[in-house]
Amino acid sequence: MNYAIIAAGEGSRLAQEGVAKPKPLVNLCGEPMVLRLMNIFRRCNAESISIIINEQMTEVHEFVSALRLDIPLHMVVKSTPSSMHSFAELSRVIPPGKFCLTTVDTIFREEDFARYIAAFEADSEHDGLWAVTPFIDDEKPLYVDVDAAMDITAFCDKPFDGARYVSGGVYAMTEKAFPVLRDCLDRGISRMRNFQRALLEAGMHLGAYSIDKIIDVDHAADIDTAIAFIKNSN
C-alpha cells in the first residue's frame, strides 16, 4: 500500500491562537504530528509515502528532508489553493497501485486504521474505500450517505434525514481516481468534496468503512483533545 499526506495548509488558525510550531510539527505524545502518521503508515505495510508541504513551511520541509525512512519518500514543496489541488500535485508522484490519502491533522486510533487498510487491501470490489465516522468534529463536515451494503450514494454539505456518517478525511482508492481528478481541474472544480462527488458521477464504486472516532486538529484546544484521545487509545 502506498500512502500520501496533504500537509500544504498554512495552519493560520493555530498560529492566530498562539501555537508557534507549524501544524505538521505539533507534538502529540512525543511525536510530531506528521511523523506519527508516517510511523503508523510504516506499520501498515507502507511501500512508499508521498507528502506535499506548503512552500512557506520551511521548518516542515527541513524536518521531512532530514528523515531517513526505510521506504521511498516522495516530497512535493508547493503552495496550492485547495486540498484538491494538493492531491493533484501528489498524484504526479504517488507510485502505481492502491494508495491511501489523508490530511496531516487527521487523528485516529492506529488499530482502527490498520483494520481499515486491511479491509481495502483485501477488497477487489470497490474503486475506493472511504473512512467515515459517526463522530462529528469538523466545523464544516461532509455528510456521507450510504446504502444497506455501506456503498456510498452521495456526499452532502448539510445533514439529511437519517444521516449517520461524515467523512473522516481518509481516502483509500485506486488509480482510477486520477482521470476524474484531472477532469475536475480542467472544469475548474476546486474543492475536495466536489471531487468526491465527481467520482460518484463518473460511476466509481465507493465503499464506506466506519471508524467510531476520527478527530481533526484545527484549533489550539484540539491539540489537548488529540493528545488525550491518543493516550486513551494506548
Image (tube, rainbow, N blue to C red):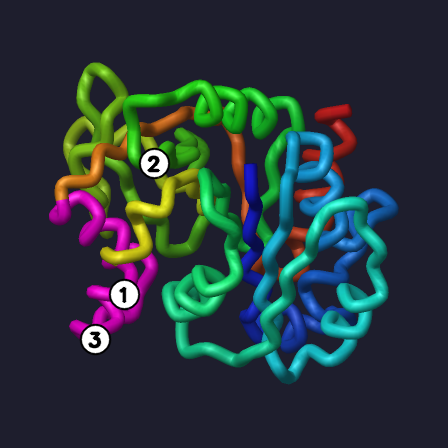
146 to the left or right of 116: left
Q: Which residues are magenta?
A: 181-202
Up/down of 22 relative to 140, above or below: below
Which residue is at a point 61% across and 76% down the rendered structure image? 77
Which residue is at a point 73% across and 80% down the rendered structure image? 58
Does 199 appear in magenta? Answer: yes
Residue 210 screen position, x and y as percent: 42, 25
Q: Disc 2 marks which amino acid? A: Gly
140 to the left or right of 106: left
Distance CA(mark 1)–CA(mark 2): 17 Å
Residue 188 screen position, x and y as percent: 21, 75
Q: Nearer the viewer, residue 136 or 100?
A: 100
Return the mark for residue 128: 2
Distance CA(mark 1)–CA(mark 3): 10 Å
Which residue is at a point 60% across and 60% down the rendered structure image? 51
Total marks in image:
3
Residue 179 appears in the figure: yes
189 to the left or right of 53: left
Up/down of 167 relative to 149, above or below: below
Q: Disc 1 marks which amino acid? A: Arg
201 to the left or right of 100: left
Residue 20 appears in the figure: no
Quarter of the image with the N terminus is top right
Question: Seen from this angle, which residue lies furthest top?
Answer: 148
Q: Secondary structure at mark 3?
A: loop
The numbered mark, 1 or 2, whose residue comes first in the sequence reads 2
Crowding around mark 3 (Cα neighbors within 10 Å: few <14, some 14 to 19, many 20+) is few
Crowding around mark 2 (Cα neighbors within 10 Å: few <14, some 14 to 19, many 20+) is many
Q: Which residue is mark 3?
A: 188
| Residues marked 3 and 2 touching at CB (< 8 Å) | no
Return the mark for residue 182: 1
Label 1 vs label 2, nearer the camera: 1
